[in-house]
Amino acid sequence: MKVLLINCSPNEKGCTYTALSEIATTLKSEDVDSNIFYIGYDPIAPCRGCGACEKLGRCIINDKVNDFINYAAEFDGYIIGSPVHYASASGNAAMFLDRAFFAAARSGKNIFIHKPGSSIVSARRAGTTATLDQLNKYFTISQMPIISGRYWNMVHGNTPDEVRQDIEGMQNMRILARNMAYHLKCKEAAKNAGIEPPKTEDIVFTNFIR
């Protein structure tokens, strides 16, 4: 079992990384492997809405989004981490995740469906719940169970050292990690018992303006 931790902060080893590292350590104690994927700070183009991914089987824009989709396919669960910028996820996070989830779904690869997902955010002070709501929507539109902690999945601090002093926040990262591990183990047990994932239907689109 492997969980992909997606670091959407422009600072590779900053506050978001500190929270994700706590999750990684706890997952390891639960015999679950994890890797951190850093999306970086280089500009990421927005989705063009061209629909080419349905024909090409990948996003038409050649950058790390396509590499991520191929790489992420082998993981069993996902945790997205982002700092709070203007009460929302980082700019690169939105561009990256919009294209990754859209292209994965429209290309027919469906790498996220029925796999558990969770999001965590870091902030100096506020804007956290709005950002969590934004990130969790990527899971709900992709038929992914959302894994929670015991509180909103956030840490507070302006530096990694300050984040480590957020004792409650860091504890919640550990609780979240254990809940993720538990879900993955339950899913594996269900598979071994012959319980299949839910059947999917062909997607129906209803337009309100006819």
Image (cartoon, grey):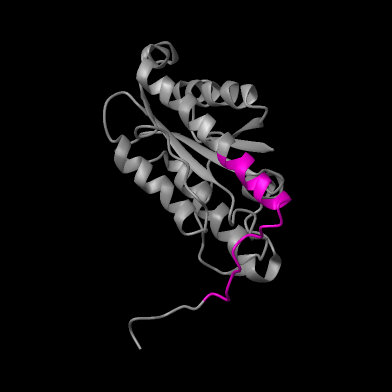
Q: Is residue 54 above or below residue 130?
A: below
Residue 47: % across, % down: 51, 58
Is 201 one of the magenta-colored residues? yes
Q: Is residue 25 left or right of residue 164?
A: right
Q: Is residue 207 left or right of residue 22?
A: left
Which of the 4 image quadrants contains residue 120? top left
Residue 130: % across, % down: 30, 42
Furthest-bottom residue in this view: 210
Furthest-front residue in this view: 193
In the rendered image, the quadrant that contains the N terminus is top right
Q: Residue at x 60, y 53 (%)?
A: 112
- How many numbered marks appear? 0
Residue 185: % across, % down: 63, 39
Which of the 4 image quadrants contains residue 91? top left
Residue 205: % across, % down: 46, 78
Q: Which one is in front, 125 or 142?
A: 142
The answer to whether one can see residue 114 in this image is: yes
Q: Is residue 113 left or right of residue 93?
A: right
Q: Is residue 112 left or right of residue 82?
A: right
Is 95 one of the magenta-colored residues? no
Range of magenta residues: 183-203
Q: Which one is in front, 64 or 84?
A: 84
The answer to whether one can see residue 158 in this image is: no
In the rendered image, the quadrant that contains the C terminus is bottom left
Q: Is residue 24 above or below residue 3?
A: above
Q: Which one is in front, 22 or 196?
A: 196
Furthest-left residue in this view: 126
Q: Is residue 163 above or below residue 190?
A: above
Q: Residue at x 61, y 43 (%)?
A: 186
